[in-house]
Amino acid sequence: MKLSTDKIGDVIVVTVLTKILDASNAEEFKIATAPILEKNNKVVFEMSQIKFMDSSGCGTLLSFLRQLKSSNGNLKLCRVQEEVRMLFELVRIDRIIEIFDTKEEAVKSF
């Protein structure tokens, strides 16, 4: 799983460089992200590359949120594609994880 990271102040922005986040690669996503979550408690996932996500991808994001909240941190999302945003609205993740249009808005929200 390819990820790109960018530190803005005390917030780490993780760009997910894959088109699909589903059962086939959710575990790989968790493993690739684990070191980032261990060292940072303010995390933004930039999701503009992801065109498709299933319940495994959603579950992974929720587990990241739980992990960060347990260390007084938080998780935000930005640049979510319309298809994925519709899924988030359907399963109501958008009520649990804040979603922003831009990386800058997400970083400022902390």
Image (cartoon, grey):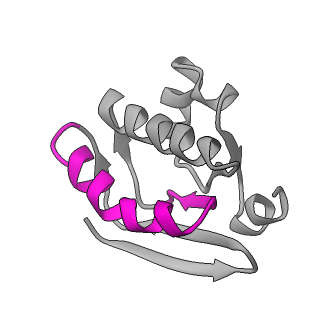
Task: Name the residue located 46 percent from the left edge and 67 percent from the top edge.
Answer: 36
User: Does 68 lie within the magenta span?
Assistant: no
User: Does 34 lie within the magenta span?
Assistant: yes
Q: Is residue 83 visible?
A: no
Task: Name the residue located 74 percent from the left edge and 59 percent from the top edge.
Answer: 106
Furthest toward the front, the residue is 71
Rendered view: 28 above or below 53: below
Rendered view: 104 above or below 56: below
From the viewer's perspective, tell me whether residue 21 is left or right of residue 102. left
From the viewer's perspective, tell me whether residue 58 is left or right of residue 66. left
Q: Quadrant of the N terminus?
A: bottom left
Q: Looking at the picture, how far across and down is residue 87, in whole percent?
A: 48, 28
Rendered view: 22 above or below 2: above
Magenta residues span: 23-48
Q: Looking at the picture, how far across and down is residue 64, in whole percent?
A: 48, 45
Q: Looking at the picture, how far across and down is residue 8, in whole percent?
A: 71, 79
Q: Looking at the picture, how far across and down is residue 103, in whole percent?
A: 69, 66
Q: Is residue 1 visible?
A: yes
Seen from the viewer's position, the closer of residues 43 and 15 is: 43
Q: Quadrant of the C terminus?
A: bottom right
From the viewer's perspective, tell me whether residue 24 is left or right of residue 65. left
